Image: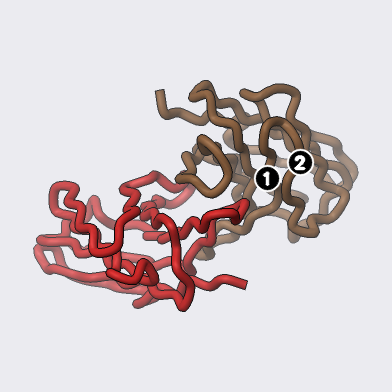
Chain colours: A brown, B red
Amino acid sequence: DTEVTQTPKHLVMGMTNKKSLKCEQHMGHRAMYWYKQKAKKPPELMFVYSYEKLSINESVPSRFSPECPNSSLLNLHLHALQPEDSALYLCASSPGLGYEQYFGPGTRLTVT
Amino acid sequence: TQLLEQSPQFLSIQEGENLTVYCNSSSVFSSLQWYRQEPGEGPVLLVTVVTGGEVKKLKRLTFQFGDARKDSSLHITAAQPGDTGLYLCAGGEEGRRALTFGSGTRLQVQP
């Protein structure tokens, strides 16, 4: 099973809302990632978790808060977002840091 | 900062034509991956190459890793509309915690 699942598929939220994105993998991978992707651009790395510990935070604003409850799950908590945060949010996992990554289908987020 | 430059950035061709996409860097990578991404979907891993000079084939797609492990190419033979998408290369380095992604090549294959 090389599947990474993400929910929801689409999300529309207001600037005062609080929402969460969820990601799950059952490949036994020890590294998980959050990316943000704008239209026609490559993915931009946001956060990296390794063995359930935050390894990289690419200077992401605090209105994005990651959480790794266990080795299979990765959440991204959203609060007080701006319209410019609208994007495709991708989750990925890999056997370890620096290895090939497997991506989920993404969550299309629209902030109104 | 490690950089991976892809060329061309955009390519529009007719069905049946051949094409090559390039991924170049001044850095040495321990491995290199190619992904294809369709609109609104996540990137899908196509191949991983790890040995300098390595060539891998996936049906009509041929991937090559440069001898010095600084560059790679993707060649598609007889392109089909289903090949349309964003092609991304990504390099892994020993001791580096995340992959370095290239800028992407957007391919459009017209029927």
Residue at 45 percent of width and 59 percent of height: B90
In percent of width and height, residue A46 lies at 70, 52
Report the side of A10 relative to B24 (left or right): right
Do the dots labelled 1 and 2 sit on one chain?
yes
Toward which corner of the image does residue B9 lie, by quadrant? Answer: bottom left
Numbered disc total: 2
Marks 1 and 2, how far apart in space? 6 Å
In percent of width and height, residue B88 lies at 41, 60
In percent of width and height, residue B40 lies at 48, 47
What's the mark number on residue A48?
1
Which chain does the numbered disc 1 sit on?
A
Using the image, determine if residue B84 lies above or below residue A21.
below
Report the side of B71 relative to A112 (left or right): left
Pick the residue in front: B79 or A35: A35
The kind of residue tagged 2 is: Leu
Q: Where the C terminus of chain B falls, by quadrant? A: bottom left
Pick the residue in front: A77 or A58: A58
Which chain does the numbered disc 2 sit on?
A
Residue at 45 percent of width and 68 percent of height: B28
The kind of residue tagged 1 is: Val
What's the mark number on residue B20?
none
Report the side of A68 relative to B52 (left or right): right
Binning the other alpha carbons within 10 Å of mark 2 as few (below 14), some (14 to 19) or many (20 upward) gives some
Q: Which tag, 1 or 2, sits closer to the chain's start? A: 1
Using the image, determine if residue B42 lies above or below residue A24.
below
| Circle 2 residue | A54
Asked if labels 2 and 1 touch by Cβ distance under 8 angstroms, the answer is yes
Using the image, determine if residue B12 lies above or below residue A33.
below
Residue at 56 percent of width and 57 percent of height: A43
Toward which corner of the image does residue A54 lie, by quadrant? Answer: top right
